[in-house]
Amino acid sequence: MSIRLIFSAFLLFAFLFLAAEPTFAKRTLPRAGGTSSIGATSSATSGVTTSVKFRADRLAINAAFKNLSIAKSVSYQLTYTGGGISQGAGGTVSDLTTEPQERELLFGTCSKGVCTYHTGIKNAKFVVTTTLKNGKKVVKTFRLKV
């Protein structure tokens, strides 16, 4: 009887603690492939619709913004650690009348047409901050598995 109790306790522990890892399934880009896209559906209370996907070579992300008519302003920021150094890129969507607005953000830097890509990318996040016309601020975070 005690072996059965121990086995049951072990199964309960395994189910509750090992299987219940935190996930960000609705906003995490998959590791394999370059065509998957995770989008956040928006309404007037949840900000603009944002679709984020990896470029085919996985050295950049492409972001598309829609439903911009509800926004007063939209800004975005890509942050990550590359080679042990904090890196990032960001900007704003200034034309809120033309849809979709698209942006490509590299995991690296470019100067005079020559791009240097970062390696060992960890803790990558893409954050979109929308200020709605009614004054409400909506922040969406996408965790990226590079």
Image (cartoon, rainbow, N blue to C red):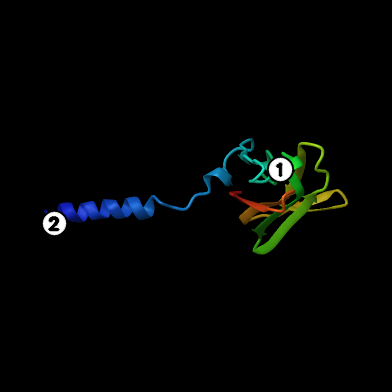
In-front residue for pair 104/85: 104
Give the labeled residue for mark 1: 63
Q: Earlier along the polypeptide chain: callout 1 or callout 2?
A: 2
In-front residue for pair 111/123: 123
Q: Residues within 10 Å of mark 2 (few under 14, many from 20)?
A: few
Residue occupying the point 66% across, 57% down: 80
Left/right of residue 5 with respect to residue 77 in the rendered view: left
Please provide percent x and percent y for residue 42: 64, 41
Please provide percent x and percent y for residue 102: 76, 41
Left/right of residue 25 with respect to residue 3 in the rendered view: right
Residue occupying the point 75% across, 54% down: 90
Give the labeled residue for mark 2: 2
The answer to which quarter of the image holds residue 6 is: bottom left
Residue found at the far left of this picture: 1
Seen in the picture, residue 66 relative to 75 is either above or below; the reply is above
In-front residue for pair 5/32: 5
- Name the kind of residue labelled 1 in the image: Ala
Seen in the picture, residue 98 relative to 20 is either above or below; the reply is above
Q: Distance between the Cα atoms at labels 1 and 2?
A: 56 Å
